[in-house]
Amino acid sequence: MSNVDTNTVSHDNAHASFDPKPIWRTFWILLGITLCELILATIHLKTGFPPKYILNGVYLILTCAKAFYIIAEFMHLRHEIKNMIMTIAVPALLFLWFVIAFVSDGNSYRELRNRYDRYQLEQNNVKAPAAEGEEAAPAAKKPGSPE
């Protein structure tokens, strides 16, 4: 048996110092980005400037900046090795691409269906049947029919 005393443990690192500076820095950065978004929204509501599509693009950029900053700070990815960061960042970017691709594809399908579906166009021109006792209005003519 050895004569090592296992009860004597150095407690020098038991009370690690807590530095609140990074937390406050994170708070101020996220607050600044959020205030920029609110100021842009207020200006847009009061004046109509900038146009809605530009404002949406700016919101998207600012929101992505906040999301990446939150991921870097609170998931501690900023302090990880590059391979770990890429393991999380690449699937997240692919997921964003996935969402954008399906939204745009769904919108183009909706537009094409409304433009080329003859039944859809016909149904838009058909009038409701007249109630009893009222004179019936002539039905809408079909495209391509004589008359």
Image (tube, rainbow, N blue to C red):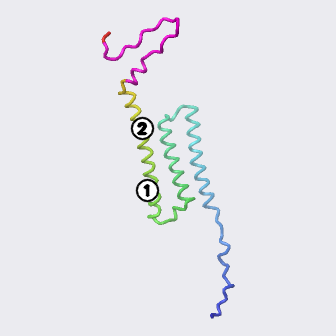
Crowd band around label 2 with a 10 angstrom C-alpha radius: few (<14), some (14–19), many (20+) = few
Q: Tell me which secondary structure the magenta stretch mostly adopts.
A: loop
Q: Residue 106: which disc? A: 2
Q: Which residue is pictured at 64% across the width and 65% down the height?
A: 19
Q: Which residue is pictured at 44% across the width and 55% down the height?
A: 91
x and y percentages locating residue 5 in the rendered image: 67, 89
Q: Quarter holding the C terminus?
A: top left
Q: Nearer the viewer, residue 18 or 101?
A: 101
**Kind of element beneath mark 1:** helix
x and y percentages locating residue 145 in the rendered image: 31, 14
Amino acid type at image mark 1: Val
Q: Which residue is pictured at 60% across the width and 61% down the height?
A: 22
Give me the C-alpha separation between circle 1 and circle 2. Answer: 24 Å
Crowd band around label 1 with a 10 angstrom C-alpha radius: few (<14), some (14–19), many (20+) = few
Q: Quarter holding the N terminus?
A: bottom right
Q: Number of numbered discs present?
A: 2
Is 143 colored magenta in this rendering?
yes
Image side of residue 48 versus residue 27, left or right:
left
Name the residue that disc number 1 marks. Answer: 90
**Kind of element beneath mark 2:** helix
x and y percentages locating residue 35 in the rendered image: 59, 45
